[in-house]
Image (cartoon, rainbow, N blue to C red):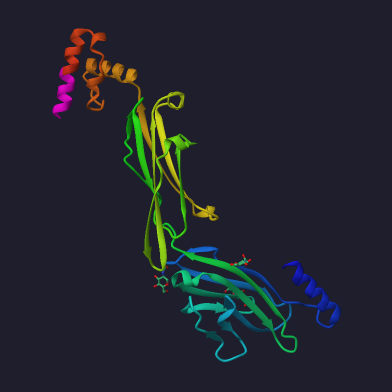
Amino acid sequence: MDIEQLLYCFILLIADFHRISCLFVTDINVPEIVDFRDNVTLSCSYDMSGHTLNSVKWYKDKQEFFRYSPMMHPVYMKFPVAGVQVQDGKYFCNESTCRVDLSLVGAKSTGTYECEVSGDAPHFKLAAKGDNMTVAALPQSDPLIDSFNSMYRMEELLSATCTSDYSSLPTRLTWFINAEQASLGELQPSIDTSIPAHDYVLRRQKLQVRFYLSGPRFYHAGKNLELKCVAEIENFPELKRETSLTAAITHYDNLNNQMLIHAGSGASGAAPGIHQHIPASKVIPILFVICLMFSSMLLSL
Ligand SMILES: *[C@@H]1O[C@H](CO)[C@@H](O)[C@H](O)[C@H]1NC(C)=O
Ligand SMILES: *[C@@H]1O[C@H](CO)[C@@H](O)[C@H](O)[C@H]1NC(C)=O
Ligand SMILES: *[C@@H]1O[C@H](CO)[C@@H](O)[C@H](O)[C@H]1NC(C)=O
């Protein structure tokens, strides 16, 4: 109940001592943002406070599209309004609540939806409440990360691309490297693609991150690297979607030590191609030979 309604009620009370009641629309439920492929339910609750319900009317942008009048025949009526399709038989109203299910017809369904309740004669008091609904083409999937490997070496150049799903609302992509936002220097200019579809211009953004795995932020981060891509839509934080992937970071020294241990015990498990990094000068010749045999064995697999 808002102040205006209370004030109005108060004035009515003073003017009419015999009726100590007022009617109110206590709640209205109109989704703020929906995808054009969805169906929506609009609902409205009211407090008749002793009045008899005369009618409940639903409007889109001031045009009536649905009416419930329990004392009339027919009880339910639909009116054609652009952008609104009340689903057959999918509505229900009584003395305290009124609900209608709509199927959407794209951008034309965007608008202000209002529920208006009126009481019986002789007073015919009116109460109304409305809310805006935006019908858009919303992303249907999380952003995609491409060309990301499951293992990287220290000092290696990493580049990965994030692509958002098509949407009629502008999407903003952000990269996070081990939970820290990527700096501008680590980002390539973003590439936007747009296609017209379903009355909308759908846009998709691609953003590449490129950086060297060097410096304390990776040494201190332990063995793992987490890359996260976040796709956000302005003004609608609830539509945020994200994807994150992790990779192992290997250090040269650790790798070499592992190679020696593995070579000695004959165990496998190291990735192929590692043999290139063995500093031959530091290795005892016999171990080196075993190592070479081991790696050629790995390569022939
Ligand atoms: C919307 O409602 C129609 C009719 O009831 C149904 O055929 C359709 O599958 C529904 N769409 C969604 C996305 O639920
Ligand atoms: C109206 O319908 C709702 C939902 O079915 C129900 O919870 C409520 O009790 C009904 N109110 C009256 C006054 O019949
Ligand atoms: C609905 O949108 C209109 C303009 O598009 C705005 O003036 C109005 O304040 C909005 N109403 C609500 C309840 O947000």
Q: Position of residue 271 (x, y in %)?
A: 25, 27
Does residue 182 appear in the picture of this structure?
no
- Residue at image x 16%, y 27%? 299
On screen, residue 242 versus residue 131, left or right, reads: left
Q: Is residue 131 above or below residue 297?
A: below
Residue at 57 percent of width and 75 percent of height? 61
Q: Residue at x 64, y 76 (%)?
A: 96
Residue 168 is situated, as x and y percent measured from the top left of the image, at 44, 60
* Observer-nearest of 187 and 84: 187
- Figure check: 22 above or below 141: below
Magenta residues, dominant SS class? helix
Range drawn in magenta = 293-301
| Residue 242 horizontal/vertical position (percent) | 44, 47
Relative image position of residue 142 (x, y in whole percent):
41, 51
In the rendered view of the protein, which quadrant contains the C terminus?
top left
Q: Is residue 56 magenta?
A: no
Snapshot quadrant of residue 281: top left
Is residue 148 shown to the viewer in this render? yes
Which corner quadrant holds the N terminus? bottom right
* Relative horizontal placement of residue 262, taking residue 172 as reference (left or right): left
Q: Quadrant of ligand 3?
A: bottom right
- Residue 102 is left or right of residue 285, and the answer is right
Dividing the picture into quadrants, the one containing residue 99 is bottom right
